[in-house]
Amino acid sequence: MDNAPTYDVIIAGSGIGGLCATRSAQESGARVLVIEKANQIGGSAAASGGTIWTARNLEEWSKVQPSGNTALGQTLVNGFKPGVEWLRSLGLQVTDVEDRPYKFKRDIVRLDPDPRTAFESLAQRIEADGGTIRTETAITGIERDNGRTSAVSVSTPSGSERIATSALILATGGFQGNAELRARYMGPWSDRMILRGVPENTGDGLLAAIEAGARTSGPFSRFYGHYLPAPPAEVGLHNFVLVKPDFSEYAITINLRGERFDDEFLGDEVTVHSLIHQPEGMGVLLFDQHIRDNMEQYSQWPTSDVDRVRNIRDAGGHVMEADTWKSLAEQMATEWQVPAATALQTISAYNTTCQDQNGTALTVPKSGGLVALETPPYYAVRVLAGITYTYGGVTINPSAEILDSSDRPIPGLYAAGADCGGIYTRGYTGGLSMGLVFGRIAGQTAAAYSRG
């Protein structure tokens, strides 16, 4: 039987991590095949706003990743600018974006006219130079021969296949679309989470790598996400950017008991980790007309239609409104069973703290963004956790090699993007940048290995 590899490198996933890995391996002389589970390329990245960013240096990165792998963090920030210039050299339109005041300093660019156009252009270039891209083809297993990667098992509409290769790059985008894994790692209310990415991200790469002997890195209970309005709002890939209440740092969020439960100024990309453990996995975002009138100032990623109240209502969501906090609390008690007395006590304590500008005096301290909620009308929106991708994944080194339980590289096995674990542990320092930087590295490393 002929055991010669059909492809030098197979890449599982065609989001930014997979496509960058593919092109990088191709530039290094490898024969490449991309397998994509969905019926089109791009993954969740193609449905994003197209902004690629990360922390400006390791010190800034460490401000929001206090227990992250610093070697991988350094690799990420070091590889960002060269990666951006590489995208430009490929003919993609990449526009510099000015950084807004934030918790840490960032470097930011944007894919124009939109990310899907950019990724389709990159895919066309890959195919024009001899690469193969197969959609509706999902990875189901990894074969190893004498410890080395030798083949990939896949599922297609026509049945199962085995494809020989000497190197495999996993870029399947995390396990956020897998309800069973979410329940295992994120608790009993994880079924309430709203998926902000494509449904095909079900952990295929992670599960195959674990079966092949890969070590994992957490935190598996954390993820990149934001608050999203609860039903009856209809939220999906078409509108999640418009309805995301990204002014929440300057508002307050209570649970269904009427109590604050986290430091809102950390950003809802952090406080969603607490939200999923509140009763029914739900919170109530409280704010006033002053915040509504200044959403562009308070938002980190303002859209052209920045009025989230109107956008949420247009999506069918319920935004409660009243001229006094007492009236609003009574409405919340009647319709949402939030104890009115507790809610009013929470709001009063918060406004008093804002006058003193001393967030440490609160039962649950708030580290900044102390804006008194005193301008009627007042608003309340029920929110759930929207999940884009997971932080837990396989363990890699700075060369994007997947490690086994003894911290040794598994020959011929690599990862990029959200399949990599241990890089983000608390905050968020860019999702597309993970795919760009580690995809590019994985492609180079895998191609070199396949030649050797």
Image (tube, grey):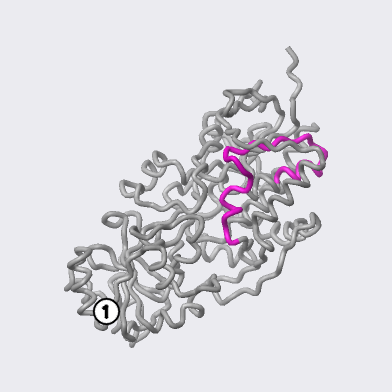
Q: Nearer the viewer, residue 202 or 67?
A: 202
User: With respect to residue 97, does 235 lie above or below?
Assistant: above
- Residue extent of the magenta highlight: 21-49
Position of the N terminus, as image quadrant, is top right
Residue drawn at 56 percent across, 61 percent down: 429
Indicate left or right for 247 with 300 as reference.
left
Where residue 28 sits: x, y (%)? Answer: 81, 42
Residue drawn at 57 percent across, 40 percent down: 38
User: With respect to residue 118, does 167 lie above or below?
Assistant: above
Q: Quadrant of residue 406?
A: top right
- Is 105 covered by the magenta stretch? no
User: With respect to residue 171, does 411 lie above or below?
Assistant: above
Q: Nearer the viewer, residue 326 or 189?
A: 326
Where residue 431 sits: x, y (%)? Answer: 58, 56
Circle 1 SS class: strand
The three-letter amino acid code for the residue at tag 1 is Ala
Which residue is most to the top?
1
Indicate left or right for 297 with 111 as reference.
left
Where residue 379 sits: x, y (%)? Answer: 32, 75
Residue drawn at 31 percent across, 59 percent down: 282
Where residue 418 sits: x, y (%)? Answer: 56, 48
Residue drawn at 18 percent across, 68 percent down: 333
Q: Which residue is mark 1?
A: 322
Position of the C terminus, as image quadrant, is top right
- Residue density around tag 1, few if under 14, some if 14–19, many if 20 or more, within 10 Å: some
- Is 45 covered by the magenta stretch? yes
